[in-house]
Image: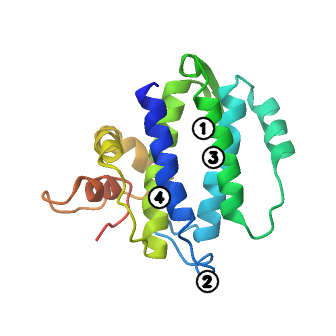
Amino acid sequence: MDPMVEMFLSAQRAFGDRVHAVGADQWHLPTPNDEWDVTALLDHLIDENRWLGPLAHGHDLEAAGKIVEGAKTTAGDDRAKVWDDVSVAAADAVKEDGVLDRTASLSRGPTPMRDYLGEMVFDHVVHAWDLGRAIGYSGEPLPAELVEPLYGMATSMADVLASSGLFHPPVEISDDASTLDKLIAVTGRDPR
């Protein structure tokens, strides 16, 4: 299996572990992302995983949007079940032969599937940290085999991240901070 696919599956699992740790009274807790509570954060990743399959299969945005709308289900308050369903579908799509040789039709234009999947890994890891921080998660830490390469990617794109409007400016932290804390700080979150 391609290492990028393995990284994506690992990032999905890390996020899913935190989803299944959300307590019944924690769905409306604030997260480090000041725009989202726990529910909105999870809904964001559910939506991203819904889009991944159609885009990986080569659909343009309009066709993918129709597929995504048609695939939405009502699971009541069981967002963990919805997460499980969409994450399995997304994982199946990226495990298909040749998927990383394709191009995804994104809102910013055609993007190599490998780059798109790398962005998805980044999003899953950063949001797994957000979710874990919000709910006081004490389970397995985020895997070093994800954090190390993502930190390298994030530091090379720090200016782009900050200027995107999606992230706050990087937070200053000590040089001896962990790689995870440095990664999180690059995204404008304070890991302390």
User: Considering only vertical position in the picture, is 191 above or below 89?
Assistant: below
Q: Which residue is mark 1?
A: 91
- Cβ atoms under marks 1 and 3 closer than 8 Å: yes
Query: What residue is shown at x 46% (from left), y 47% (from top)?
Result: 11
Compute the Cα span from label 1 to label 4.
17 Å
| Residue 122, numbered label | none
Question: Mark 1 or mark 4, which is nearer to you?
Answer: 1
Query: What residue is shown at x 57% (from left), y 65% (from top)?
Result: 20
x, y percent for residue 108? 61, 32
In the structure shown, which secondary structural element does the residue marked by tag 3 occupy? Answer: helix
Instruction: Tell whether 132 sits left or right of 153.
Output: right
Identify the residue at the far bottom of this view.
25
Q: Earlier in the sequence, mark 4 or mark 3?
A: 3
Instruction: Tell whether 101 sits left or right of 150.
Output: right
Question: Mark 4 or mark 3, which is nearer to you?
Answer: 3
Q: Earlier in the sequence, mark 1 or mark 2?
A: 2
Q: Nearer the viewer, residue 154 or 128?
A: 128
User: Considering only vertical position in the picture, is 23 above or below 81?
Assistant: below
Q: Which residue is mark 3?
A: 87
Q: Nearer the viewer, residue 147 or 192?
A: 147
Q: Which residue is mark 2?
A: 25
x, y percent for residue 157? 35, 39
Compute the Cα span from label 2 to label 4.
19 Å
Instruction: Tell whether 30 sits left or right of 169.
Output: right
